[in-house]
Amino acid sequence: MSFERACALSEIDTDEARAVTVGGVELALAKVEPADGGAEVFALQDLCSHAAVPLSEGDVVDGTVECWLHGSCFDLRTGKPANFPATEPVATFPVELRPDPSGAIDVYVDVQTTLNGVTPA
């Protein structure tokens, strides 16, 4: 795997998506903080599979990111659409959280590997 730094964890607001580019791939990063503590970060290609709309501009709710234009929601873990009009999944990528020398946490993403087998558009 080939992980590259995407941003600091503190740069991603909880339950919101943030647009970043890693290795030439535009990503939507979403941070979810479960009730039991900690933080999970998910990386999806920042492009709705139904229309050329950035998913990073949508809302993150209940483990999905919503495309603001037509309302399709994509599962953060699998990239699969939960409702119409989208019918095709978006690529999802492995994420690692790593401490930097100051003790802050950085987000690293491997855009060479997809978790769901979808090739980025």
Image (cartoon, grey):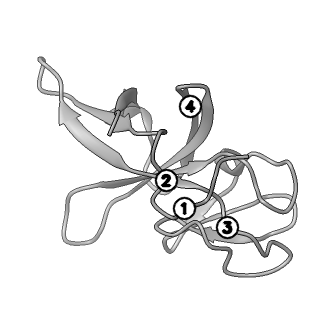
User: Is 102 displayed left or right of 94 in the figure?
Assistant: left
Mark 3 to mark 2 CA distance (whole Å): 12 Å
Query: Based on the displayed image, in which of its 4 quarters is residue 98 positioned?
Result: top left
Residue 20 vertical position relative to residue 41 in the rendered view, above or below: above
Secondary structure at badge 4 equals: strand
What's the residue type where badge 4 is placed? Val
Going from N to C along the chain, the mark reached first, 3 or 4, is 4
Q: Nearer the viewer, mark 4 or mark 1?
A: 1
Asked whether 73 or 59 is in front, the reply is: 73
Mark 2 to mark 1 CA distance (whole Å): 5 Å
What's the residue type where badge 1 is placed? Gly
Residue 37: horizontal and vertical position, in percent?
19, 63
Mark 4 to mark 2 CA distance (whole Å): 17 Å
Residue 24: horizontal and vertical position, in percent?
61, 25
Secondary structure at badge 2 equals: loop
Question: Badge 1 is on which residue?
Answer: 117
Going from N to C along the chain, the mark reached first, 3 or 2, is 3
Q: Are marks 2 and 1 in contact (CB under 8 Å)?
A: yes
What's the residue type where badge 3 is placed? Pro
Mark 4 to mark 1 CA distance (whole Å): 21 Å
What's the residue type where badge 2 is placed? Thr
Going from N to C along the chain, the mark reached first, 4 or 1, is 4
Q: Nearer the viewer, mark 3 or mark 2?
A: 2
Question: Badge 2 is on which residue?
Answer: 114
Question: Badge 4 is on which residue?
Answer: 20
Q: Are marks 4 and 2 in contact (CB under 8 Å)?
A: no
